[in-house]
Amino acid sequence: MLAAKTVSEFKKSGYFVIPGVIDAVLNRRLGAFVGGLANGGAGSRRLLDEAWCAHLAGALRGNGKMNSLLPRNAVAMQCTLFDKLPTKNWLVALHQDLSIPVKQRVESPECSGWSEKEGQLYVQPPISVLEQLVAVRVHIDDCPAESGALRVVPHSHLEGRVDPSQAEALRQRHGEAVVPVPQGGALVMRPLLLHASSKATSLGPRRVLHFVFGPPSLPLELEWRWAV
């Protein structure tokens, strides 16, 4: 169980690094599972269909170092693999994560940005939903700055949904932090936190399993595509 001071700091800053979330044996197994994925792109968004991934989601939810940072009765509703290599290298501009995977479209003025990714339906839900979400980025490899570690704008999640034209002004106001994460560790963060990443300059891999946890149910007759 994390100290109350740490939980309070997470609520303010919007992120926290927890080392040693998975041990060396499990880390090797995860590396083997990820290596067996037939995907020629940067990653996959549908990993919760895999039994090993659903099992890991349950283990994360029950982890005493982390569960005080997750929503009450949290469910894992998404897991994405980000596999950054010298041959699959990219940068990500400053942004918030605003879309969630759902089962079907609903007609509501509070829902916007409907899209399809890897055959799955996504939507931008009301801000009240986004404010409850917590992402857990499990690092299979060491991720120093030169491996394309995330750069975050502390406290920016408290600004709600940020107009992209205002993102740079918030970075100037709050500053930017590079967040290295050790192998087997996890970066826990609010998806509304403004974040970016640079291209990797090192030759090693940077494989990250990006879980998102949310409340067990949604408003407006929306339903999670996955709820593990």
Image: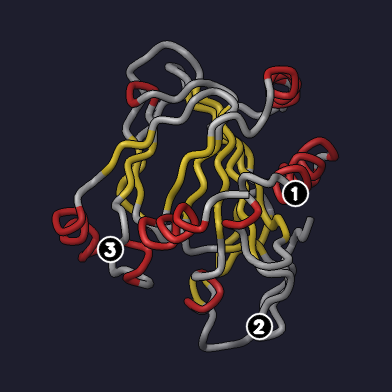
Q: Residue at x 19, y 56 (%)?
A: 168
Which amino acid lies under the numbered mark 2 shown in the image of this protein?
A: Pro
Specify few, some or many for label 2: CA neighbours under 10 Å numbering under 14, 14-19, or 20 or more.
Answer: few
Q: Position of residue 75 (x, y in %)?
A: 73, 60
Decide which of tag 2 and tag 3 comes sooner along the chain: 3
Q: Position of residue 73 (x, y in %)?
A: 73, 66
Circle 2 or circle 1, nearest the eye:
1
Q: Residue at x 70, y 55 (%)?
A: 76
Q: Nearer the viewer, residue 6 or 222?
A: 6
Secondary structure beneath dot 2 equals: loop
Decide which of tag 2 and tag 1 comes sooner along the chain: 1
Label 3, label 1: how far apart the Cα atoms are: 35 Å
Which amino acid lies under the numbered mark 1 shown in the image of this protein?
A: Gly
Residue 62 numbered tag: 1
Q: Which residue is mark 2?
A: 219
Q: Is residue 228 left or right of residue 91?
A: right
Q: Is residue 170 left or right of residue 49?
A: left
